[in-house]
């Protein structure tokens, strides 16, 4: 792994600092998160079908039997954000190439432990700031992490949601919501947890592999879950209010979420894969990026830029600038994580044998020409 880096963006400027942290929305108020941030206070929505850690439909890597030869990616990351055409900025991102050293008091020498996240706030930025600050800490402090990584991550999402509910009780001005996507690299494993419509796309030898699913109310599985929870979808909106089916926060919106459950879920959907030498980089971004980029289009664009300058920060900026050119109407935030020092290689498609044939008309003309030679 390259130099340790921790980068947050609270959408004032695109800059990095090893000491900067996003503001804690409840700091300075004389309150601390206590019981409601613990595991015993978590309430899983009874209507939510538990999503197991998914096997992405990729070719599996052959087992080597020798742990010493296991492929370990060399992580390099960068990010960029822009307010876009909106009047306020509600997107937040975090990059932590050395996750455990920043979020745990004890040092860890167990190889790659990286955390990357994007948070797209709505109704204000407080929920996005809160999740950006607390979600990685809840993951790092979980005693089951990383042995039971899927349980630890899901628990951290729900702890963050529950803790923010308490913060909103203490200060009603915090009322807001946010989608959240977290990508963790643990050794050679990539795990992505998503609640909302942010997206993660892996580039594997030039091919786009979607590592998350957009949680829109009109999606069949989400619509069925919403209706089973007593909610409904009206013109693409959950209960006529939100255009996402999963999010953290939004406790103030009537009929969407309560301690007993509700149609709006804060539980993430998880996908994982084992990284190989064919994996080049990962793009995670808020929906403002994906409104104007198809997944393969974003991978192709980012790959060309990385071949030119091999800089994940510049690549992130290039993606944001291109989204602005394409008239994205939302805030824009994107994180690019490279898995190698080298830029993506040129891919040469194998040339197949060319079969040439002559049309019937051509054959007739050739026959006529040969007949004239006989004369």
Image: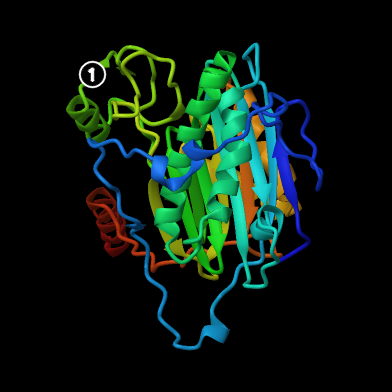
Of residues 358 and 219, the one nearer the viewer is 219
Of residues 176 and 330, the one nearer the viewer is 176
Is residue 101 found left or right of 283 in the rendered image?
Answer: right
Residue 228 in percent (x, y) is at 18, 29
Secondary structure at numbered mark 1 = loop
The answer to which image quadrant residue 374 occupies is: bottom left
The answer to which image quadrant residue 195 occupies is: top left
Residue 241 in percent (x, y) is at 37, 13
Is the N terminus in the top left, top right, bottom left or bottom right quadrant? bottom right
Point 79% across, 40% down: residue: 20
Point 70% across, 58% down: residue: 105
Is residue 19 found left or right of 278 in the rendered image?
Answer: right
Of residues 244 and 171, the one nearer the viewer is 171
Give neighbour class at mark 1: few <14, some 14-19, many 20+ (Cα, 10 Å). some
Picture mark count: 1
Of residues 150 and 12, the one nearer the viewer is 150
Residue 207 in percent (x, y) is at 47, 55
Write down the residue under mark 1: 232
Point 70% across, 66% down: residue: 107
Is residue 233 found left or right of 3 in the rendered image?
Answer: left
Point 75% across, 53% down: residue: 5
Is the C terminus in the top left, top right, bottom left or bottom right quadrant? bottom left
Residue 328 in percent (x, y) is at 56, 22
- Specify whether residue 248 is in view: yes
* Image: 326 above or below 56: above
* Image: 41 above or below 263: below
* Image: 324 above or below 161: above
């Amino acid at each position: 792994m390259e130099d340790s880096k921790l980068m947050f963006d609270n959408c004032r400027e695109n800059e990095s600092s090893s000491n900067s942290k996003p503001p804690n929305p409840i700091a300075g108020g004389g309150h601390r998160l206590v019981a409601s941030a613990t595991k015993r206070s978590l309430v899983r929505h009874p209507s939510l079908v538990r999503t197991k850690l998914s096997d992405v439909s990729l070719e599996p890597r052959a087992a080597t039997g020798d742990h010493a030869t296991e492929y370990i990616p060399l992580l390099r990351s960068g990010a960029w954000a822009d307010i876009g055409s909106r009047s306020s900025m509600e997107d937040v991102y975090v990059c932590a190439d050395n996750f455990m050293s920043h979020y745990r008091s004890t040092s860890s020498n167990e190889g790659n432990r990286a955390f990357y996240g994007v948070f797209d706030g709505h109704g204000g930025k407080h929920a996005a700031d809160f999740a950006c600050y607390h979600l990685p800490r809840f993951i790092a402090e979980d005693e089951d992490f990383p042995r039971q990584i899927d349980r630890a991550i899901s628990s951290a999402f729900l702890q963050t949601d529950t803790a923010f509910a308490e913060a909103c009780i203490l200060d009603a001005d915090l009322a807001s919501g946010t989608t959240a996507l977290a990508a963790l690299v643990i050794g050679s494993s990539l795990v992505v947890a998503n609640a909302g419509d942010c997206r993660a796309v892996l580039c594997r030898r030039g091919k786009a592999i979607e590592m998350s699913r957009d949680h829109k109310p009109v999606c069949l599985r989400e619509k069925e879950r919403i209706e089973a929870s007593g909610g409904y979808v009206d013109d693409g909106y959950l209960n006529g209010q939100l255009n996402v089916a999963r999010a953290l926060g939004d406790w103030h919106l009537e009929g969407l979420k309560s301690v007993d459950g509700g149609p709006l879920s804060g539980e993430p959907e998880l996908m994982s894969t084992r990284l190989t030498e064919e994996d080049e980089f990962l793009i995670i971004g808020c929906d403002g990026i994906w409104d104007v980029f198809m997944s393969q289009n974003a991978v192709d664009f980012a790959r060309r830029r990385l071949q030119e300058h091999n800089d994940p920060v510049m690549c992130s900026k290039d993606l944001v600038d291109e989204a602005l050119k394409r008239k994205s109407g939302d805030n824009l935030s994107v994180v690019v994580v490279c898995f190698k020092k080298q830029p993506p290689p040129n891919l040469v498609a194998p040339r197949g044998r060319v079969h040439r044939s002559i049309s019937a008309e051509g054959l007739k003309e050739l026959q006529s020409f040969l007949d004239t030679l006989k004369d």
